[in-house]
Image (spheres, rainbow, N blue to C red):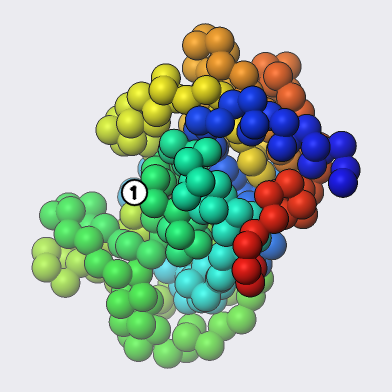
Amino acid sequence: MTSATRMLQQFVHQHPQLLVLTGAGVSTPSGIPDYRDQHGNWKRPQPVQHQHFMAEHDIRQRYWARSLAGWPTIRDAQPGIAHKTLAALEQQGNIIQLVTQNVDRLHQRAGSRRVIDLHGRSDHVRCMDCQTRYLRERVHQHSAECNPDFSNLKAPAAPDGDADLAELDFSGFQVPHCPRCYGILKPDVVFFGDHVPRSRVERAQQALQRADALLVIGSSLMVYSGFRFCKWAQQLNKPICALSLGQTRADDLLSLKLNAEVSSTLQHAFPLKGPA
């Protein structure tokens, strides 16, 4: 048993009612890429900005064309050891609320029930005019049918269902639109430059007030929407533990820093009963 495993066990034992905040490092073993390296630097070009997506047709053409190659990676991903272990800890009563920065819904598929999708969910698409929601897969299939020249593109997936495709002419791509009002369709996620809905933030804040401590797993906390949970925990005098490879934005706020691989540490600290 490693020291990280022992310290994580001890932290949970001492603080049995946790608010858990998860990031990309929980889902990378499931094949979903992350944005940043262990130093918090970008590993790929920055993702599309909300304002650009809404204002520029050519940006929407590029996004939805690349999505034909990138979305299947998110759609077909399966929950990993970390997702399943956290679901088991919730069932045991150790997690009163899980807040995830991920949009892949793998926590729910692993069995977690008390989940706040801080940045939304990538399996839904929302009309930005009439607010009607659609299944992402329905939009994906329609988009592929309307754009046969793009439907068989292969490229490395990006974290949000985008793909690393370059040097292509997207000008002929037919962008999917709302079948109800012809409005702009956008994945029901918080793009960079947008704001997390207040209701989600308030629910998470209330849970943090009830919790014994904050446990951060697999996040560099470079995005403020995640980092502010550490600021709030500090103001509430709640202990903060981070299990993540590399540095985080909140290193100077942490009560305990576990610089260790997420899945194996969770697996050894809290072995699952039965098949993983």
Can residue 32 be spotted in the picture? no
- For disc 1, the neighbor class at 10 Å (few under 14, some 14 to 19, many from 20) is few
Residue 24 image point, x, y percent: 61, 50
Q: In front: 199, or 177?
A: 199
Q: On the picture, is 217 further left or further right than 259?
A: left
Can residue 154 be spotted in the picture? yes
Look at the numbered disc 1 and give the secondary structure of its residue.
Answer: helix
Q: In front: 174, or 256?
A: 256
Which residue is disc 1 drawn over?
Answer: 55
Q: Which quarter of the image is occupied by the C terminus?
A: bottom right
Rendering quarter of residue 122: bottom left
Residue drawn at x 36%, y 75% is 137
Above or below for 148 versus 25: below
Q: In front: 101, or 143?
A: 101
Report the residue that reaches farthest toward the right: 2
Residue drawn at x 57%, y 43% is 22
Q: What residue type is labelled 1?
A: Ala
Q: On the picture, is 41 further left or further right than 225?
A: right
Q: On the picture, is 80 further left or further right than 258?
A: left
